[in-house]
């Protein structure tokens, strides 16, 4: 960002830039206050539970496998696959059933009957409500764990070469939007003379071309990006049709239609508007272009807001317009910065008034970015631990640091601008006061065609001379270097912003790592089924303990224990005790003494599980006065 200020005395530009520096200093304080009281917000969907649970050992084969998610997802025929130890499909190979109730998001697949004992793999893939593909896998066992030939997928959904190209197109789309909208705004709001400058025209047109090409690439790659990950599926017309029926597909098509309107805007801006000489007519046309261009720019920005993080979670009706404002502010600031850089390097000259107007636009953009950025961070992060301990939070910190660096470099640009203005004005006045050359009088005696040719040559020589004077000016060179540094930081900033849009928000990542559900969904988990053989070493001391914990969540649970003898029949024992320990949190052992209900069957109600995690369950079985054994097994609860 660049600003103009005279050498002496306060100026209206100095005050806004000082305010910008103060604003930046206060962002951290406000950010902290908001995060301290932040509530949960939903964005990237996350798996919050399953039945059977990950790693569970169940006594009998379940009829179905169900998965619970933190928010709405889109599923297809192969979104949930259950594979037996040999890698064959154990599910009925049908589209997952929607078992959702109220705010609970749950899908399930039916299993074949008569499944043998062993370890089964559940692989799932879906599309989150914010348009990003998600995937994962886990295992459970029937009877007892066994070897399996199934290899868990190492590549996440949306990865691989297709994911790389898609992410490059996503970055190019943001860059094209910044150049298109920011460059047009710079011409209309800051430097109307730029409409006739060929470098400025090229900048805006290239922004339009980049955004259009990137949008087409994203539309064509959307099917393989969220599905197979193979480039060959670009030509799958059925897959493309399926994409068009989704929210992200509709957003991309809408963007292409709006880019058609943007092409008409560009034609008028650099055609009719550039040729208009009457000031009143040009003023009216400026207003019309500003309104029409603003509507188109807002619509294009909305295609991101309606299909990504802002479109889901709490306060979506507020988050989407806030996201649109954020994108427009980014475009006005960074796109204007790119336009200023082009004007300094490629055009005959840009007046100090245009630089001052851009300074005001840039300051307003910084204010909007700060306000909307804080709100977005509140929704997507929610806590200091998520800010510092997740990839999303770390990228957010990097983005804030880059903005601070950008503002610091802009301060140097402001100083160079103040010096440049006086120097440039003096050189222009000197060139205007130069007496007419002898060739002027000679050209009057030539035919019109020759006179016009000489006039063009003199104009070219004059422009070259002025450019040489400006380029030799150390103040102008200093400004060009500082603005170039700003642009370099802006490129990195845009890359970080693009990475944020495709990164799982900190709140969701933290919840998934902790194994806790989203606040928008009920407590996750599922019944826990364990089977443990024992041998006390005495007569009739061998048997099997079976344990069921329902509902297998934090809070109150019912616990049932069955003991079978070596002959498979119910077996009574003189004493049975249990204890639960969460070693990762130094909780426990929490003793549980079940009551005998029938031969070989014990039960305990209201067993409290204070926290989700990997609990160790110790079972002590005594088969005689002197023969007893303690066995243990881990189970994920909650």
Image (spheres, rainbow, N blue to C red):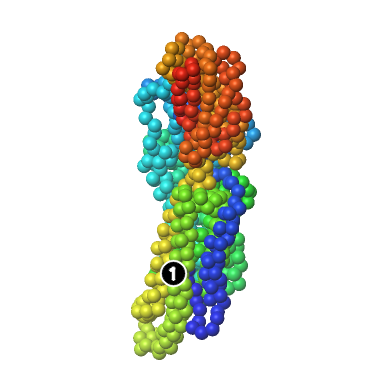
Looking at the picture, tell me which residue is in the foreground, 132 or 178. 132
Relative to 200, say whether 350 is above or below.
below
Q: Is residue 186 left or right of residue 316?
A: left
Q: Is residue 605 left or right of residue 127?
A: right
* Farthest-out residue, front: 625
Looking at the picture, tell me which residue is in the foreground, 630 or 219. 630
Q: Give the class, few, some or many, for how many residues have Cα within 10 Å of label 1's Cα (few <14, many ≥20).
A: some
Q: Residue at x 59, y 30 (%)?
A: 607
Looking at the picture, tell me which residue is in the foreground, 415 or 505. 505
Q: Residue at x 56, y 50 (%)?
A: 382
Place of residue 376 in the rendered image (x, y in percent of width and height, measured from the top left): 56, 53
Q: Residue at x 60, y 37 (%)?
A: 521
Q: Residue at x 44, y 80 (%)?
A: 419
Relative to 124, say whether 399 is above or below.
below
Relative to 331, say whether 86 is above or below.
above
Relative to 345, say whether 558 is above or below.
above
Quadrant holding the C terminus = top right
Based on the displayed image, in which of its 4 quarters is residue 349 positioned?
bottom left
For mark 1, give the secondary structure: helix
Give the mark count: 1
Looking at the picture, tell me which residue is in the foreground, 549 or 519. 549
Q: Which residue is mark 1?
A: 409
Place of residue 281 in the rendered image (x, y in percent of width and height, measured from the top left): 59, 69
Place of residue 451 in the rendered image (x, y in percent of width and height, measured from the top left): 38, 80
Based on the displayed image, in which of its 4 quarters is residue 290 positioned?
bottom right
Residue 209 visible to the viewer: no
Residue 420 visible to the viewer: yes
Place of residue 113 in the rendered image (x, y in percent of width and height, measured from the top left): 49, 15
């Amino acid at each position: 960002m660049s600003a103009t200020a005279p050498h002496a005395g306060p100026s209206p530009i100095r005050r806004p830039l000082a305010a910008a520096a103060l604003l930046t200093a206060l962002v951290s304080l406000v950010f902290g206050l908001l995060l301290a009281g932040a509530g949960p917000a939903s964005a990237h969907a996350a798996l919050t539970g399953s039945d059977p649970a990950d790693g569970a050992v169940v006594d009998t084969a379940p009829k179905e496998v169900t998965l619970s998610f933190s928010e709405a997802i889109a599923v297809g025929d192969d979104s949930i696959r259950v594979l037996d130890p040999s890698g064959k499909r154990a599910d009925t190979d049908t589209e997952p059933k929607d078992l959702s109730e109220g705010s609970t998001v749950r899908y399930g697949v039916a299993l074949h009957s008569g499944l043998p004992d062993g370890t089964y793999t559940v692989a799932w893939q879906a599309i989150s409500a914010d348009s990003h593909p998600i995937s994962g896998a886990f295992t459970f066992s029937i009877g007892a764990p066994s070897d399996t030939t199934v290899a868990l997928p190492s590549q996440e959904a949306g990865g691989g070469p297709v994911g790389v190209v898609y992410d490059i197109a996503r970055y190019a789309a943001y860059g094209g939007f910044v150049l298109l909208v920011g460059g047009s705004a710079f011409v209309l709001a800051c430097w109307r003379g730029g409409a006739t400058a060929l470098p400025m025209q090229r900048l805006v047109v290239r922004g339009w071309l980049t955004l259009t090409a990137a949008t087409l690439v994203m539309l064509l790659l959307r099917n393989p990006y969220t599905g197979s990950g193979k480039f060959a599926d670009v030509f799958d017309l059925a897959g493309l049709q399926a994409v068009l029926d989704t929210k992200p597909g509709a957003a991309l098509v809408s963007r292409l239609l709006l880019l058609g309107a943007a092409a008409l805007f560009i034609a008028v801006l650099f055609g009719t508007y550039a040729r208009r000489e009457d000031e009143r007519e040009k003023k009216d046309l400026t207003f019309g272009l500003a309104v029409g261009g603003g509507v188109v720019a807002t619509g294009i920005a909305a295609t991101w807001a309606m299909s990504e993080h802002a479109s889901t979670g709490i306060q979506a009706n507020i988050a989407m317009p806030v996201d649109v404002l954020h994108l427009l502010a980014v475009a006005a600031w960074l796109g204007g910065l790119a336009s200023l850089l082009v004007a300094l390097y490629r055009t005959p000259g840009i007046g100090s008034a245009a630089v001052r107007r851009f300074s005001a636009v840039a300051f307003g953009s910084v204010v909007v970015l700060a306000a909307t950025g804080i709100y977005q961070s509140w929704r997507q992060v929610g806590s200091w631990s998520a800010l510092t301990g997740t990839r999303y939070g770390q990228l957010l910190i990097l983005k804030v640091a880059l903005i601070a660096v950008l503002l610091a470099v802009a301060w140097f640009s402001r100083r160079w601008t103040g010096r440049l203005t006086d120097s440039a004005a003096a050189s222009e006045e000197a060139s205007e006061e130069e007496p007419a050359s002898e060739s002027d009088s000679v050209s009057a005696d030539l035919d019109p065609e020759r006179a016009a040719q000489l006039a063009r040559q003199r104009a070219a020589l004059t422009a070259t001379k002025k450019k040489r004077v400006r380029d030799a000016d150390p103040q102008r060179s200093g400004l060009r270097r500082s603005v170039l540094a700003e642009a370099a930081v802006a490129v990195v900033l845009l890359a970080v912003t693009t990475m944020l849009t495709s990164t799982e928000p900190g709140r969701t990542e933290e919840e998934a790592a902790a194994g806790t559900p989203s606040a928008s969904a009920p407590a996750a988990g599922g019944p826990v089924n364990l089977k443990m053989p024992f041998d006390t070493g005495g007569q009739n001391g061998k048997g099997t303990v079976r344990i069921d914990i329902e509902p297998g969540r934090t809070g109150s649970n019912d616990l049932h224990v069955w003991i079978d003898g070596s002959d498979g029949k119910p077996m009574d024992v003189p004493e049975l005790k249990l204890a639960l320990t969460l070693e990762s949190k130094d909780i426990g052992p929490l003793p549980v003494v079940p009551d005998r209900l029938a031969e070989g069957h014990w039960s305990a109600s209201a067993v409290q599980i204070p926290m989700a995690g990997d609990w160790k369950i110790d079972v002590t079985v005594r088969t005689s006065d002197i023969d007893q054994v303690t066995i243990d097994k881990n189970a994920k609860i909650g």
